[in-house]
Amino acid sequence: MKKTKVEIHVPSTWVKYKPSLCKGCFAGCCTLPVVVTAEELYHLGFLKYEEVTGPLKPHVEKLKKKKIIKSFNSRTKLFTLYQHPNNDCVFLTKERLCSVYDRRPFICREFPKNSKRPGFCPNQKFQKDSEK
């Protein structure tokens, strides 16, 4: 059987998820868009309680300027987290680890159960510059 290269934005190439795959992974799942609620931004420390319970629109520009969010959908009241130019999540470190792991958003906690291909992940081994 020929092994297919995993393409992050092509779920049909993803591999069946096993927790052991995360160790040494490139964190491809952390390059996908992350949608969060105002409550999650509160738990992450970016909104105050009063801001969560009031109108959200006044806080959007502040969060964009700080590069915490990329966008806000006023209809759904959901925010999309900022992604670096290489698509890395704003909270992904250079070591490819989550800097807010203990407070990470629900969508991240549930991945890959809630992905475009449930039960599969875009696993790719992480290579340090010295290994290339």
Image (cartoon, rainbow, N blue to C red):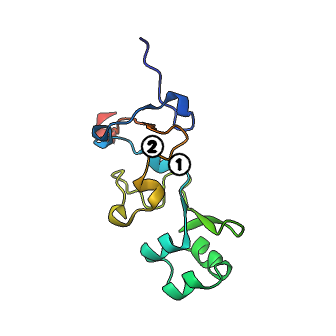
Spot occupied by residue 120 in the image (x, y as percentages of width and height): 44, 36
Question: In 3D space, how far apart are the residues under numbered discs 1 and 2 (Cα atoms)?
Answer: 7 Å
Q: Which residue is mark 1?
A: 32
Image quadrant containing the N terminus: top left
Up-down: is 28 above or below 53?
Answer: above
Residue at 54 percent of width and 50 percent of height:
87
* Residue at the limit of the structure toward the top, as seen here: 1
Spot occupied by residue 80 in the image (x, y as percentages of width and height): 59, 61
Q: Is residue 41 left or right of residue 25?
A: right
Q: Residues within 10 Å of mark 2 (few under 14, many from 20)?
A: many
Instruction: Give yes or no for contact between labels 1 and 2 (Cβ–Cβ under 8 Å).
Output: yes
Judged from the image, the secondary structure of the residue bearing numbered disc 1 is loop
Residue at 40 percent of width and 36 percent of height:
123
Residue at 57 percent of width and 66 percent of height:
69
Quadrant position of residue 76:
bottom right
Spot occupied by residue 124 in the image (x, y as percentages of width and height): 40, 35
Residue at 27 percent of width and 38 percent of height:
20
Residue closer to the observer: 10 or 74: 74
Q: Which residue is mark 2?
A: 28
Amino acid carrying mark 1 in the image: Leu
